[in-house]
Amino acid sequence: MNWNLFVSELVAGITHGSVYALIALGYSMVYGILKLLNFAHGDIYMVGAFIGFGITTVFGGAQNLTVSVWVLLFVMLFCAMLGGGLLGVLIERFAYRRLRNAPRIAPLITALGVSFFLENAAQLVLGAQYQSYNSYGWHNGELWVKGFTLPAGVHVGVAQVIVVVGTIVLMIGLTLFVQRSQLGKAMRATSFDREAAAMMGIDVDRVIVATFFIGSALAGAAGVFNGLAYQQVWPYMGFVAGLYAFIAAVVGGIGRRAARKSGGHQSLMAQDPNTPRVGIDEWVASHEQRNVRRSGLAGVVQREVERIPAPAFYLAFGIAAGIVPALTTNGYIIKVGLDTLLYMLLALGLNITVGYAGLLDLGYVAFYGFGAYGFAMLASPKFGIHWDTLAVIPVVVIATAILGFLVALPSRRLLGDYLAIMTLFFGELFFTVYQNGEHMSFLGFGRARDVTGGPNGIPDIDQFNAFGARIGQLNYKAYYYVALLFFLALLFAMYLVDRSRTGRAWKSLREDPLAAELMGMPVNRLKLIAFACGAGIAGLAGTVFAAANTAVFASEYDFTSGLLVIVYAMLILGGAGSLGGVILGAVVVNVSLEVLRTPGHATWIFFTLIAATLVARVRPWRWLATIAAGTAGFGFAVHAIVSATWPRGVHGQAAVGGVLGNGLKNWVVLPSNPMTIGNVAFICLVLAVLALTLLHGWMQRLAMIPTLYLAAFVWENRLAVEPSITRLILIGVILIVLMNARPQGLLGTSRVEIV
């Protein structure tokens, strides 16, 4: 055995494990009290790492530090922990607080939205490139030259000692705080029984805020320790670290104190109106809340629309979608239509698992990738196999459905958070295997072979062919009609399933698994069928995608690619459990994302949406006129002041031309170099919008005037010129806002989850 290598890897593992331990502590603390898997926790760790990097830059950079190493470390840790803690408190206050008594799926999806928003906002503000702490250069490598040498000849630097010892000190401090302080005892009481703790006089809100602050502060410290030991930081570093930390939390016993609490030991005297009431059927009692009726003309229109049979809408959609290619010869529009139909197929399959059965599947896009790779392997020069399409598609769909069945088989007894995490790990396993599949062997036996093409994927995929006819390469119009036929056939099938015994059983499973099982429904079998059906539809969409694009790459199906979050945004926007919502959500989200690719079009949409929102939400009308006039006047005043005091502040160009562009150039401040000031303004805009939600009455309406102008400034100077990032930020915002404002989506119905 190479002892030198073994000890070296052991030291590296302990150092890295210390970082994950701090992140895992925050996971466990939040889960113990709220039963919430805070997927954004890893991104707080990322923010802490960048705060540490920023402090290093403030003090002269790695090569020219103006303070001692120990002063620098203290300031870095203090600022990173304070910044991480405050960010955690903001996330809890504005993203999670309203969802404490919501169905478990709502805070989970919100956490995904927060994570997506933080990652892409960080990329917008900080850039996509890697940054380096370069701690090797701090005062001639003081933290690495000094240290001690182990018997195996392995040198351990002071930086590694700081990471391990610092983690131990923080963990001991947290343990003493939780066990001996009054707030720590309140945390333990709240984790055992939140309602009973509130009845005993404990300020539960204060306890939850403190928990988020402490857990997020530890994540911020972990970010600094990671930069200190491993140098590099980047906007997407939080996701993978969060996964590893969650594994550590599960192995160590995530929320184990709370887990010992008996499920029946619930307070029956809680005064929270959102908790179940004794002797009252919650589903019946909440019928009126779940069926909100509009008044006036909108109510009349709603009632008349509801009288029209659902198949009539689906038929109208099919006819309208069928004539789109006949109305245009623009290949880009047809390609967008094809992508939208593929999203509809994905959302339709996800709707079975999430919308009908209520099972949160975070590895869903892996089935999409499995179908695409399956088609590529059976119809390409990769292995010299060129099966007919009519043979490949059934094989791939059945194989993908079986894979879904196998994934669900060991997890059929899991619910909520643990099911979501298990499927997320499956998705990452798929990506890892297929991304590194250029050298694969069976359990290490035999010669390694190129199975998936690795990062290069599988190119030159055959086109669809049947009965001697073949679709031409990149003939998106033909694939558009193929995808449309597949979607309409599956939509009709799902309409029948929705009205069948299986559909009703899935909905019963979604609302209350225990009650469904007590009524004699085969709960485990229903879960397996839901996973298999959803996976099969995703596999079918994958075959169309592979043939239409003539190549597949594993990176397209990774969680960080955003595909999963986009599909969830479509499903949630339209309404989980609604077939019409699948169509509406896919059309709105994908078309919006495509429009945002062009700054000119995106600018028109942006200001139109702001105007429409003001008209729809601001009452009485005199306040609408006041806000509109005030915003216009405020903008002209700011533009005049900046023009007189800082001429370069108005020398930039608007993102759109024409009348709107000329108007914006004379109203919005457009610096010639807007990068830095635009980034600061973006952060200020986020804080201003959050603050706006805390105000009420005339104060909120007056505060809207500078906030609207700030939004216009940020849009013109940063968001409109970074469409690829802006599109992804929008997805995160959609998930957060919808889950807090209307978790059932536009066409869905509210759920009642029995505690």
Image: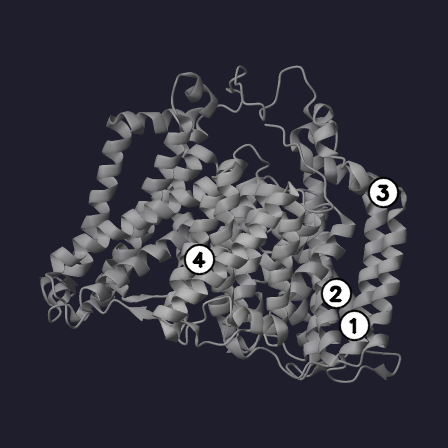
Instruction: Name the image quarter holding the C terminus.
Output: top right
Point 16% across, 58% down: residue: 72
Label 4 and label 3: CA atoms lie apart by 43 Å
Residue 22 visible in the picture: no
Give the residue at mark 2. Answer: 341
> How many angstroms separate mark 2 from mark 1 (CA)?
8 Å
Query: Counting other residues with Cα less than 10 Å from the Cα at mark 2, is it few (<14), some (14-19), or many (20 or more)?
Result: many
Question: Looking at numbered disc 1 in the image, what kind of residue is underneath it?
Answer: Tyr
What is the x, y in percent for residue 706? 47, 53
SS for dot 2? helix
Which residue is labeled 1 in the image?
A: 480
Q: CA distance from mark 1 to mark 3?
A: 30 Å
Residue 181 in the image, given as x and y percentages of width and height: 25, 27
* Quadrant position of the N terminus in the picture: bottom left
Please state the horizontal and vertical placement of residue 25, each as a whole percent of the image: 34, 43
Residue to which mark 3 is pinned: 306
Judge by depth and name the residue closer to the eye, 643 or 91: 643
Q: Alpha-carbon distance for marks 4 and 2?
A: 29 Å
> Which of the marked residues, 4 or 2, is nearer the chain's N terminus?
4
Which numbered circle lies on residue 239? 4
Q: Are the residues at dot 4 and dot 3 in contact (C-beta closer than 8 Å)?
A: no
Mark 1 or mark 3: name the one nearer the start of the chain: 3
Residue in view at x 73 percent, y 60 percent: 345
Which one is in front in this view, the residue at disc 2 or the one at disc 3?
3
